[in-house]
Image (cartoon, rainbow, N blue to C red):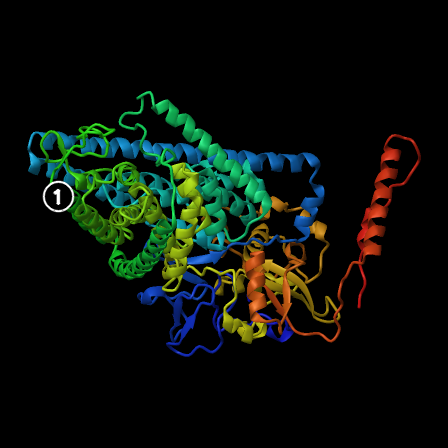
């Protein structure tokens, strides 16, 4: 662990032979020979050490020297990753700042935190509405032009217009993604999930990524790809929260100094969690589902205060969306009508079910688990092939996107020609055939009074296709052959589309495919089941979501909020549990697989079984780099230049102390700030803490935003300065988490995970151990002393008696406990 072995003077300033996973700084095994493989215990990602001690990339890419940090594949680019500092650095500066804060500062902090989550909800809701408005108008205009040409029997011209529009939109989406922000490709949920676990990969939450995520998603969905904007909306909400939390962007001249209170990873983590919840709420119009999604899938750490703030954020999103949708119902938003924001109202359907229906639902769960496991397996293979293509550069990414666009356009326009025309039902609730707008009955090439059932699914936006599959009272609308063809096409197109250089989500393809086979099962079992095929489509979508994403509670609530059908709750719960159980026997969830494939060292909530047979001392690497409490500037600069470690133990040695003594832990960013201030001394003398506090404040050591931090290459020193000394006591974290070297590795890993640590010091066993306890008697005495002091202070304040305030600093010593 980044502390390595226990602090021993004879190891002072010796460089490590190899630095392992720097994300959580649990070091790898010592002595890896040339070509040895090492499996990351937190992510199962296979890494290999070459003859120079360098880590080779995941997916066996070309060799790149990287001796300082873990590496990952984000946007098909190799990039170094670091860990986030969720631990509070309790150094003297922090303690002084905490003591100096008054009630107005605390009140200001609380008000700003609630203001930020309000802004996150407002902005995410506006972006979600803008995305849907743009997609409905762009895709609707494209389909309207194509339909008009087909009504004039200009079929080839219609295909050129349809395919050409898709091609231009797809190429534009791929171009901005490949050249501006490669990290914006894909859904972004695996990256956000890893970030909330403590992994800071380059540019995954940058302003450029936010820009490409919004406009790339609009262009990609409008291009007719089998993808959704729901996953990108989660990433968009996280980017908005990160932008607000770090005080804006200096690069783009968008900064706010009053947000300095949030320049730490702990507060940013909470804001980004709220952003994830807001993204789901904006995508599905499901505020409760958004909170549960953040809890179940995204966040690694949760607490009750965060639950309340996330719920408030999603409530704001729901209010914003509802207000804007009501405004658009008057026809002022172009082709955006009641569609766009998915809402499939099935509340009018009375769901009564019996024992045969339960057997059919169990069958749906089994099918969903098998199809989901197969989908994840095939997607993993396809993404590995795509990574080889994408690493060739931006032109290859754009070319791959264009090829997939052409295939999608040919399927969407060509396959409906295989279906026969069906006469419009006499009791049709909607207009039949549908001309010039969305609906169940697409005319396509059919004569008046007839419709093409397959065109109603293919020749539509994905949202309208789902709405058609979920529609009730349409048991005979779609031929069985049309449903089979549509299922195979969507299943395959969903596999080949995810992974191209376009922001893309998996929710919509999975819901489409699941709803299709659910409707197939409902139609086949219509003689023994009383459920409507539209309800079977809903259950099929739930089963496929459970089989691919392995989420249960959040998916259940999201689907119920989408359909407004609470009566289906028991059936949705049952089918989700069955499909997840079946699929878990094959592989992991799709997002977990992508996290592993990208090389993101995600740390699971449980320890691996083999960790029970190891202790903490078995996995630390050495020799250890330590600093003295008063260290020579040249030694610090040399250590920072030749290593990428982010934490260094501080050990006082004679003559500062009689015996070697662990002072604490100092982190790289604080060292750089201290060196930049150049408060050096000519002699190695321990200075008082006020010497540093007069020059620096706590906010001087606050974490900068992405890419803004100091680097050792930015600092320059003269030969005279390199021979001077600097006192590290004021910036050293005097209360780092430490474990004894004989602690079980499983316990140490759980400690890392539960506390969100980046560094853990491993110390040797000592012959004398003191255990701090607090008995009930001592606790009552402390409470009485504190209460008595406050009462006397109150009486003195109103001049009722003359009283010298009781020194409250004595209370901790009274409550010191019992040493045994």
Q: Residue 520, image x and y in percent?
A: 25, 48
Q: Residue 502, image x and y in percent?
A: 29, 47
**Which residue is disc 1 drawn over?**
419
- Secondary structure beneath dot 1 equals loop
Residue at the extreme right of the image, as rendered: 801
For this view, does 470 lie left or right of residue 436?
right
In this picture, is 743 found above or below 109? below
For this view, does 448 lie left or right of residue 127?
left
Residue at screen point 33% across, 52% down: 360
Q: Is residue 758 visible?
A: no
Q: Residue 346, image x and y in percent?
A: 36, 36
Q: Nearer the viewer, residue 728 or 65?
A: 65
| Mark 1 residue crowding within 10 angstroms, few (<14) / some (14–19) / many (20+) | some
Quadrant hosting residue 729: bottom right
Q: Nearer the viewer, residue 51 or 271?
A: 271
Q: What count of labels does the image hold?
A: 1
The quadrant of the picture occupied by the N terminus is: bottom right
Q: Residue 670, image x and y in percent?
A: 58, 54
The quadrant of the picture occupied by the C terminus is: bottom right
For this view, does 532 lie left or right of residue 171?
right
For this view, does 35 lie left or right of residue 270?
left
In this picture, is 88 found above or below 632? above
In this picture, is 8 found above or below 184? below
Q: Is residue 603 visible?
A: yes
Quadrant hosting residue 366: bottom left
Residue at screen point 55% across, 76% down: 613
Quadrant hosting residue 413: top left
């Amino acid at each position: 662990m980044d502390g390595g072995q226990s602090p021993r003077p004879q190891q002072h300033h010796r460089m490590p032979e190899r630095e392992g996973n720097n994300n959580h700084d649990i070091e790898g095994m010592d002595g890896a020979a040339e070509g040895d493989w090492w499996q990351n215990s937190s992510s199962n990602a296979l890494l290999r050490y070459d003859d120079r001690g360098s880590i080779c990339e995941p997916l066996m890419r070309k060799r790149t020297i990287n001796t300082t940090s873990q590496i990952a594949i984000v946007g098909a680019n190799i990039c170094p990753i670091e860990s986030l500092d969720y631990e509070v650095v309790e150094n003297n500066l922090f303690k002084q700042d905490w003591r100096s804060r008054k009630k107005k500062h605390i009140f200001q902090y609380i008000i700003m935190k609630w203001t930020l989550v309000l802004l996150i909800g407002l902005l995410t809701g506006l972006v979600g509405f803008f995305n849907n408005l743009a997609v409905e108008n762009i895709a609707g205009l494209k389909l309207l032009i194509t339909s008009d040409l087909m009504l004039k029997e200009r079929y080839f011209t219609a295909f050129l217009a349809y395919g050409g529009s898709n091609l231009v939109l797809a190429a534009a989406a791929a171009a901005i993604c490949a050249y501006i922000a490669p990290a914006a490709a894909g859904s972004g949920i695996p990256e956000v999930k890893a970030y909330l676990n403590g992994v800071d990969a380059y540019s995954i939450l940058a302003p450029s990524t936010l820009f490409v995520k919004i406009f790339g998603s609009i262009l990609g969905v409008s291009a007719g790809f089998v993808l959704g904007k729901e996953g990108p909306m989660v990433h968009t909400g996280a980017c908005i929260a990160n932008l607000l939390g770090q005080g804006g962007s200096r690069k783009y001249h968008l900064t706010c100094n009053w947000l300095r209170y949030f320049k730490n990873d702990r507060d940013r983590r909470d804001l980004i969690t709220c952003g994830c919840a807001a993204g789901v709420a904006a995508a599905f119009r499901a505020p409760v589902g958004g909170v549960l999604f953040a809890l179940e899938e995204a966040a690694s750490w949760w607490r009750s205060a965060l639950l309340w703030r996330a719920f408030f954020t999603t409530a704001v999103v729901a209010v914003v969306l509802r207000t804007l949708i009501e405004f658009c119902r008057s026809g002022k938003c172009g082709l955006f009508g009641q569609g766009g924001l998915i809402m499939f109202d099935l509340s009018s359907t009375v769901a009564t079910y019996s024992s045969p229906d339960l057997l059919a639902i169990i069958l749906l769960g089994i099918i969903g688990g098998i199809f989901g496991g197969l989908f994840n397996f095939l997607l993993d293979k396809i993404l590995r092939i795509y990574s080889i293509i994408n690493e060739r550069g931006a032109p290859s990414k754009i070319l791959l996107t264009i090829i997939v666009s052409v295939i999608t356009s040919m399927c969407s326009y060509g396959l409906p020609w295989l279906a026969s025309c069906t006469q419009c039902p006499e009791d049709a609730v909607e207009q039949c055939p549908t001309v010039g707008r969305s609906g169940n009955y697409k005319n396509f090439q059919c004569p008046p009074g007839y419709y093409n059932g397959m065109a109603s699914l293919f020749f539509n936006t994905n949202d309208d296709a789902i709405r058609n599959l979920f529609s009730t009272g349409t048991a005979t609308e779609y031929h069985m052959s049309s449903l089979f063809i549509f299922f195979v096409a969507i299943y395959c197109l969903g596999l080949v589309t995810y992974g191209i250089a376009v922001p893309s989500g998996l929710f919509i393809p999975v819901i489409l495919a699941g709803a299709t086979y659910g409707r197939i099962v409902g139609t086949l079992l219509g003689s023994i089941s009383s459920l409507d095929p539209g309800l079977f489509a809903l259950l099929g979508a739930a089963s496929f979501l459970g089989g691919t994403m392995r989420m249960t509670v959040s998916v259940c609530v999201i689907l119920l909020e989408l359909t407004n059908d609470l009566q289906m709750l028991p059936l949705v719960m049952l089918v989700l549990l069955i499909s997840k159980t079946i699929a878990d026997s094959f592989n992991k969830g799709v997002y977990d697989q992508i996290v592993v494939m990208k090389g993101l060292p995600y740390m699971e909530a449980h320890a691996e079984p083999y960790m029970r047979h190891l202790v903490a001392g078995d996995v630390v690497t050495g020799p250890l780099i330590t600093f003295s409490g008063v260290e020579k500037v040249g030694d610090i600069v040399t250590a920072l230049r030749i290593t990428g470690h982010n934490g260094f133990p501080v050990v006082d040695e004679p003559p500062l102390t009689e015996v070697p003594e662990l002072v604490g832990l100092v982190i790289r960013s604080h060292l750089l700030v201290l060196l930049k201030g150049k408060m050096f001394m000519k002699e190695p003398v321990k200075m008082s803490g006020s010497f540093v506090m007069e020059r620096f404040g706590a906010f001087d050591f606050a974490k900068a935003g992405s890419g803004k931090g100091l680097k050792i290459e930015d600092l320059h020193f003269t030969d005279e300065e390199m021979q001077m000394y600097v006192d590290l006591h004021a910036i050293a974290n005097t209360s780092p988490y430490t474990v004894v070297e004989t602690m079980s590795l499983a316990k140490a890993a759980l400690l890392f995970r539960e506390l969100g640590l980046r560094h853990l010091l491993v110390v040797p066993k000592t012959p004398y151990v003191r255990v701090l306890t607090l008995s009930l008697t001592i606790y009552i005495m402390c409470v009485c002393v504190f209460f008595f002091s406050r009462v006397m202070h109150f009486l003195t304040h109103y001049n009722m008696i003359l009283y010298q305030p009781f020194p409250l600093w004595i209370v901790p010593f009274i409550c010191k406990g019992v040493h045994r």
